[in-house]
Image (cartoon, grey):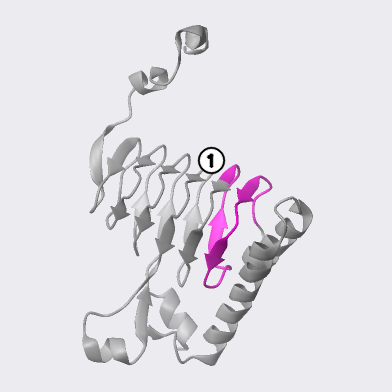
């Protein structure tokens, strides 16, 4: 079993000394660098680079610059996907985003972690556990999502949260560590509407 196969199974693997993984990360960093140097108005080249990096992205997405990832091919996202500035995705394992996911600035998604045992860690070993994000999830600024986390549909993750456990659907969750604050209710549909907009809230 090679190091890439070990990573895909959630085993400890050597990402730091394996030439093929180093080569794949270098390719991804070069593409990220090229993307981040593009003029923001150059939508054609930006889309082309993301397609080379990720493979087959959705038809409707916008990833603001700068953006960084480790491999690219482990990332997938649905329609109407929006990422604000300075997002980092360490995609040693799969990172899956559903439709209508909105990500505020300075958010990070880390599938990679290192052993607590110092000898294993000093050998360059790490693990990678998948991250799965449902549909219609909104991340506030400066959120960190850690390895192995699943977040359900229609959930809001508050700014500054560190998400180290699964979060269910239809809730507001926040904090370090991130925890469920409450369910999202019908009253939340009216929260930001002014009087002139009341006819639009049904």
Left or right, 33 with reference to 195: right
Q: Residues within 10 Å of mark 1 (few under 14, many from 20)?
A: many
| Residue 157 magenta | no
Residue denoted by label 1: 100
Q: Is residue 36 visible?
A: yes
> Residue 93's spot in the image, x, y percent?
45, 69
Tell me where the magenta segment starts and ends, as one range: 57-81
Provide the major secondary structure of the magenta segment.
loop
Q: Quadrant of residue 164?
A: bottom left
> Residue 28's spot in the image, x, y percent?
60, 73
Above or below for 14 versus 195? below
**Residue in the image at 34% along x and 19% along y:** 187
**Residue in the image at 56% along x and 88% along y:** 20
> Residue 3's spot in the image, x, y percent?
45, 86
Left or right, 119 with reference to 185: left
Q: Is residue 55 visible?
A: no
């Amino acid at each position: 079993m090679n190091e890439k196969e070990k990573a895909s199974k959630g085993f400890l693997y050597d990402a730091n000394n394996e030439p093929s993984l180093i080569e794949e990360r270098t390719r991804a960093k070069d593409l990220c660098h090229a993307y981040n140097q593009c003029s923001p108005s150059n939508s054609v080249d930006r889309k082309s680079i993301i397609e080379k990096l990720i493979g087959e992205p959705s038809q409707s997405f916008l990833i603001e610059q700068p953006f960084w990832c480790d491999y690219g091919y482990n990332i997938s996202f649905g329609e109407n996907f929006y990422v604000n500035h300075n997002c980092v995705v360490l995609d040693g394992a799969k990172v899956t985003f559903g439709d209508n996911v909105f990500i505020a600035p300075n958010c990070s998604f880390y599938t990679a972690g290192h052993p607590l045992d110092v000898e294993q860690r000093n050998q360059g070993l790490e693990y990678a556990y998948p991250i799965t994000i449902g549909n219609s999830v909104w991340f506030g600024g400066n959120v960190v999502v850690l390895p192995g986390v699943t977040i359900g549909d229609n959930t809001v993750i508050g700014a500054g949260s560190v998400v180290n456990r699964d979060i269910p659907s239809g809730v507001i969750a926040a904090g370090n560590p991130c925890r469920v604050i409450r369910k999202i209710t019908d009253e939340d549909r009216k929260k930001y509407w002014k009087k002139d907009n009341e006819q639009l809230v049904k």
